[in-house]
Image (spheres, rainbow, N blue to C red):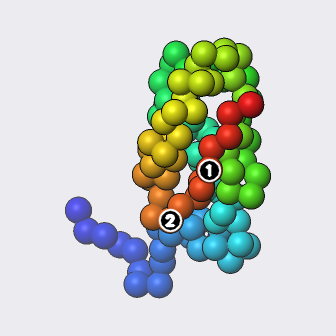
Amino acid sequence: MIDKRNKDTSTLKDCIDKMIDVYRLRQKYNETSIITSWGKVMGAAIASRTLKVFIRDKKLYVKLSSSPLRNELSMSRSKIIELLNKDFEKRVIEEVIFI
């Protein structure tokens, strides 16, 4: 099949990425992506015990319904940060705080 696009055309993905950069929304987009991927990255068992997830000043705040789980996850903060930042070229999350 012959590609009939002109040289001056762009893909929809490229246009959306450019728009996100022009309006300086990249950081907020990355933060939102991390929040939505929390359940996928951490698994169903942890996601079901998560009450709230939000980001403020590059710190991820996670409210959990289980104190033992909070203590368990507190011991592996660096691994959680690494897993969540893995999909991005730069560090979106610098710290995780369990509440």
Q: Work out whether residue 71 or residue 89 is closer to the camera in this orientation and state it.
A: 71
In the drawing, what numbered circle is on residue 90? 2
Q: Amino acid at mark 1?
A: Glu
Q: Secondary structure at mark 2?
A: loop
Q: Nearer the viewer, mark 2 or mark 1?
A: 1
Q: What residue appears at the point 59 percent right and 65 percent down from the top-left corner?
A: 16
In this view, 67 is above or below 11: above
Residue 41: percent from the left, percent from the top?
A: 47, 34
Say how many tags the image has.
2
Residue 68: percent from the left, percent from the top?
A: 60, 16
Residue 55: percent from the left, percent from the top?
A: 72, 48
Split into 4 quadrants, where in the image is the C terminus?
top right
Q: What residue appears at the point 54 percent right and 29 percent down from the top-left corner?
A: 73
Q: Secondary structure at mark 1?
A: strand
Split into 4 quadrants, where in the image is the N terminus?
bottom left
- For label 1, the crowd category at 10 Å Cα-Cα, with few meaning under 14, some 14 to 19 and many 20 or more, is some
Q: What residue appears at the point 50 percent right and 65 percent down from the top-left corner?
A: 90
Q: Amino acid at mark 2?
A: Lys
Quadrant housing residue 63: top right
Query: In the rendered view, does 24 fall on the left or right side of 2?
Result: right
In the drawing, what numbered circle is on residue 70? none
Which residue lies under the disc numbered 1?
A: 95
Q: What residue appears at the point 68 percent right and 40 percent down from the top-left corner?
A: 97
Q: Work out whether residue 69 or residue 17 is closer to the camera in this orientation and state it.
A: 69
Query: In the rendered view, does 43 fall on the left or right side of 1?
Result: right
Residue 5: percent from the left, percent from the top?
A: 40, 74
Question: What distance separates the C-alpha of mark 2 from that of mark 1?
Answer: 14 Å
Could you tell which of marks 2 and 1 lies nearer the N-terminus?
Answer: 2
Q: Is residue 88 visible?
A: yes
- For label 2, the crowd category at 10 Å Cα-Cα, with few meaning under 14, some 14 to 19 and many 20 or more, is few
In this view, 86 is above or below 61: below
Quadrant housing residue 83: top left
